[in-house]
Image (spheres, rainbow, N blue to C red):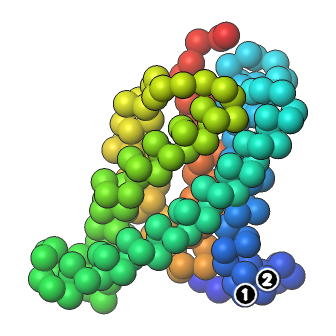
Amino acid sequence: ANWIAADWKGWAWVQAQPFQSAAIQFAILGTLGEVIAATVRQRRFTLPCTPARLALKALAWALLGLIIKYGFIGMRGFTELLLDKGMLPGFLAQENSRLGFAFALSTLTNVFFGPQMMAFHRIEDNLILGEKGFKGIQRAWWTLVWFWIPAHTVTFALPQDYQIGLAAVWGLVLGIILGLAKPKS
């Protein structure tokens, strides 16, 4: 799969700086996703908040990108250890089934890591927007089942260098889907 980005000049930097690139990719795509979702909801171009708060949201997305990068690495190790200890079905082993392993990794990541990550992201948003509480968090958690497990199965089937970028793109896609699902504000 190295042919995918073989000619892109920035690819060496992405590979050499995985954490910085994760932060930048999430800052750009996460913020763009919020702008697109707000625009879709309003049916005209609009920002989801003031430009100053949007800049803070970009920083929050960057931090989230770092957390997700660490989470992906940790959950991969966790999944591999469970397989090594025989605590997951052997057919999910990466040597036997890349897609099976990707599904196991996605499921474990979204069950054990996803809810806490989403709660942290809500706390970030609340601090930036001056809001309180976790209104709508259950709706966000349901996306772990119907969107994130399938999406991350695809993500984790790719080589690791491509995973964080695709995860950021999936966030953008989900923002558009949720923006379309909400009634016009």
Q: In which quarter of the image is residue 181?
A: top right
Q: Residue at x 12, y 83 (%)?
A: 86
Which of these two is toward me, 121 or 156?
Answer: 121
In the visual, does 135 lie left or right of 26?
left
- The x, y position of residue 68, in whole percent, is 54, 62
Q: Locate the N terminus and report the quarter of the image it occupies.
A: bottom right
Kind of residue at badge 1: Ala
- The x, y position of residue 89, in whole percent, is 14, 75
Q: In this view, does 85 lie above or below 151?
A: below
Which of these two is toward me, 145 or 133?
Answer: 133
- The x, y position of residue 132, in whole percent, is 54, 25
Marks 1 and 2 close (CB-CB < 8 Å): yes
Q: How crowded is mark 1: few (under 14 residues within 10 Å), some or many (20 or more)?
A: few
In the visual, does 116 lie left or right of 127?
left
- The x, y position of residue 111, in whole percent, is 31, 54
Q: Mark 2 points at which residue?
A: 13
Kind of residue at badge 2: Trp
